[in-house]
Image: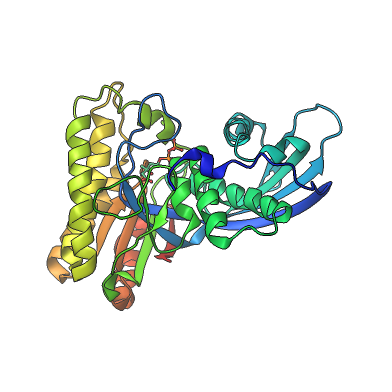
Amino acid sequence: MKTNCFFYRKKKYYIPPNGVVTRKSYSNIALIKYWGKQNNKIQIPLNSSISYSLGEVYTVTRLIYKEKKKSNLPIRIFFSGKEKTSFLPKILEFFHRISLYCSYLRNYNFTIETYNTFPHSSGIASSASSMSSLALCIMEIEKKLVSSLKEDFFLKKASFLARLGSGSACRSIYPGLVVWGCHQSIKRSNNLYAIPYPYDVHSIFTKIEDTILIVDDEPKKILSSKGHQLMNNHPYARDRLKCANKNMNKLISILKIGDFQEFGELIEHEALTLHAMIMTSRPYFLWMKPNTLNVIHTVWDFRKQSKKNIYFTLDAGANVHLLYPIQEKTFIIKWIYSDLFAYSKKIIESFCL
Ligand code: DP6
């Protein structure tokens, strides 16, 4: 079922007067990047994407709901214990977008208490884990109203709602490899919500480490939501879309065969393509910092000498994700701390769930 109507919840249900729900959700790192949104549509991607959900980097959200008595501002947000009015516009927009599908929300005032295990707006997808944990909280409320709600629907709708908050967030609902966006080679893939990757995956890709080098922990100057807009009228947009589609086909066979070198080359190419798109937008921008390049070159040199399977990918920021099979962890992690520590403000040892 791939229409918005599937997710409407208009019927009147018993509305509990107040309560609290808490959910945790992991960040994710895209292997094939979502970049650009379809014009005049809400949160529909230009191309399909695939990501790994990440252990250790997550958001915990506690959503307190109270029956609305008067028409005061319905939402307050606390991030790591401090009230954050600067987050309000995005959250209000999110509640506005999803109110059509969750009409019961109109009955409540909300307090959102949330924290991350990593710096927000620093290139680790904080919007992915925060919006997905909030969407999961909202579905927990819906579950209280509709006792017959099935787990499969719960997750699909959570992904659908999360997408309306932040595109990449819809992939964070599931562990493992997750696909969002319609691709002709992936059955049930669609633009409205993410699905777990439905095909065989070689065992080498089931235990992958992701060591994240925080090169820069300042909030990003250009947020990804602005960056997506720059794909409209981008001179290379058509080629990028063709390339993303081809890369997805390549990745499907790589994941099956278990060729780590091909995998690594593909994800590095994707990461550099994403950055090339932002560098050639109007206005143009550069997310990489000198230490991003230092890390990349050091990884390339190390790989050449050691023949180890270590490859990088990047998000919309300066930080570097290093992906390698768990079997090679002992050697590689030692090398990371000895040769890359100087380029990083912080190292986060994560893994693909
Ligand atoms: C580069 O999901 O943050 O991380 O939908 O506007 O919230 P919005 O954008 P967002 O974009 C993420 C882009 C990316 C690639 C990816 O995660 O696929």
Q: 212 above or below 45? A: below
Residue 343 % position (x, y): 34, 52
> On the picture, is 4 further left or further right than 107?
left
76, 220: nearer the viewer: 76
Q: 78 above or below 151? A: above
Q: Is residue 324 visible?
A: yes
Residue 195 % position (x, y): 41, 55
Q: 203 above or below 121? A: below
**Count of numbered circles in the view:** 0
Ligand 1 is in which quadrant of the figure? Answer: top left
Quadrant (top left, top right, bottom left, bottom right) of the C terminus: bottom left
Q: Is residue 309 visible?
A: no
Residue 9 % position (x, y): 63, 42
Residue 227 in which image quadrant:
top left
Q: Residue at x 18, y 42 (%)?
A: 243
> On the picture, is 14 further left or further right than 37?
right
Q: 230 above or below 251? A: above
Q: Residue at x 24, y 25 (%)?
A: 234
> On the picture, is 248 further left or further right than 115?
left
Q: Looking at this rendering, what residue extends furthest in the left direction? A: 304
Residue 335 % position (x, y): 29, 69
Q: Residue at x 59, y 58 (%)?
A: 24
203, 284: nearer the viewer: 203
> On the picture, is 224 further left or further right than 46?
right
